[in-house]
Image (cartoon, grey):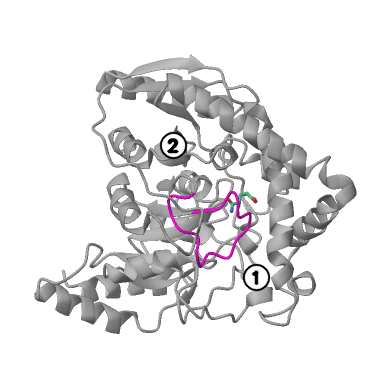
Amino acid sequence: MLVVEKVKKYLEAIEKDNQKGKKINAILHLNPNILEEAKVVDEKVKKGKAGKLAGIVFVIKSNICVKGLVANCASKTLENFKAPYNASVIEKIKAEDGLIIGMANMDEFASGSSGETSAFGITKNPAALERIPGGSSSGSAASVAAGFCDVALGSDTGGSIRNPASHCGIVGFKPSYGAVSRFGLIDLGMSLDTIGVLVKNVKDAKLVFQVIAGKDERDPTTRKIEPKKDIKKIKIGIPQVGASKEILDLINKKVKEFCKKNGWQETQIEIKHIDLGIQTYYPINYVEFFSGTRKFDGRRFGKKIEDSCGKEVLRRILGGSMIAEEEFSGRYYKKALDAKKLLEKEFEGAFEKVDLIVTPTVPRLPHKFGEKISFEDMYNYDTLTVLANIAEICAVSVPAGKIQGIPVGVQIMAARGKDLMLLEAAERFE
Ligand code: GLN
């Protein structure tokens, strides 16, 4: 099929169900030049000169800069902000002829786990319409699950790629910290943020990851990824974690089947302080977010953030400003950094004994719209995903099955830099 034809099909699907029909509300802005750009790619294909991503149609989370398109982080603060340049990942995607069809809805400034904090309306879960799609990459996950694109880019600070991938029944991959450049990402917590992919299958994740990964002089935290090695006998570690019984039963059953099929080994492991993820994550997130948002004072970009943002963003700014103060920082932020180091070490130790660590991606099923949940409960959606960000390792969520008709994902984690090994293993899990 011509790339133009494929793009037209996606545009039709978006027209039918994004704002009308099922009202998924996954996409906030379309790329007005997409058909022209698709024609150019078709020409290149004809001449045999097309890049590795020719014909792949992307939706991009609205906190990643795509030159000329609105990158508003689903916030009134940046409502009409058009990105003046391309993020490094976008440059790389375009250089390989990937096409960008539009910008995704999300939780405001990537602060949330449900897609409900967007200033431009909730996103529905295409796999369970009356339920949240998860977040904060809500629109990215829903776009893939609704058939609006092939691949979506998201950002993951504490689970924002894996959480919605799990709830929407797709694959979500968070690379190791530093594997993918963050240049051009509007940050949430810069020591935890990673850009990654939401896809229909692991094969697509591998393809796109290999294009966007690698060292970038504009992001000094980037480093080379480890080359792929053949995986033979894999040892899987299963730590004890808190999650609903039905989810734990499903995941355990899947892991057993998977190990049997591949001749891999599974073993229980202990990771000390594994229950401290949330307490470690939020002080760091609040302080870094507070500091990152100081540029939104209304002079250079959009409106002053405190005057224009939603409740959750304001909670983080006020909380972050307080715990960043000299008198409190020793009590919260520095302690959280110490706890981060501790968890990093624990995971390093665990990966000396096993190759992969497996848990559910999310400990509970996604709630229904209208159901009131406390902010603490909202934070607890991420108890199992924040661990990989804290330990700077790579992790992927792969569909494991359904409970009451709602998708449930299994999270597979590997040591920092072992991204390709992880994807190779995850492919067998599918
Ligand atoms: N839900 C978490 C938070 O609200 C994670 C967000 C993310 O990964 N961007 O901070």
Residue 344: percent from the left, percent from the top? Answer: 57, 33
Count of number-bearing discs: 2
| Relative to 181, 369 lies left or right | right
In which image quadrant can residue 299 be found? Answer: bottom right
Dot 2 amino acid type: Lys
Q: Residue at x 61, y 58 (%)?
A: 110
| Relative to 135, 329 lies left or right | right
For residue 136, above or below residue 29: above
Q: Which region of the structure is painted magenta? A: 178-194
Q: Is residue 59 visible?
A: no
Residue 332: percent from the left, percent from the top? Answer: 80, 42
In which image quadrant can residue 295 be found? Answer: bottom right
Residue 312 covered by magenta stretch: no
Is tag 1's residue or tag 2's residue first in the polypeptide sequence?
A: 1
In which image quadrant can residue 242 be found? Answer: top right
Q: Secondary structure at mark 2?
A: strand
Q: Residues within 10 Å of mark 2 (few under 14, many from 20)?
A: some
Chief secondary structure of the magenta span? loop
Residue 29: percent from the left, percent from the top? Answer: 48, 76
For residue 33, above or below residue 387: below
Dot 1 amino acid type: Ser
- Can you identify the residue that label 2 sits on? 402
Residue found farthest to the left: 47
Q: Quadrant of the C terminus?
A: top left
Residue 186 covered by magenta stretch: yes
| Relative to 161, 285 lies left or right | right
User: Spatial distance from mark 1 to mark 2, Cα to Cα?
Assistant: 33 Å
Q: Secondary structure at mark 1?
A: loop
- Can you identify the residue that label 1 sits on? 75
Nearest the viewer among 127 and 309 is 309
Q: Residues within 10 Å of mark 1 (few under 14, many from 20)?
A: many
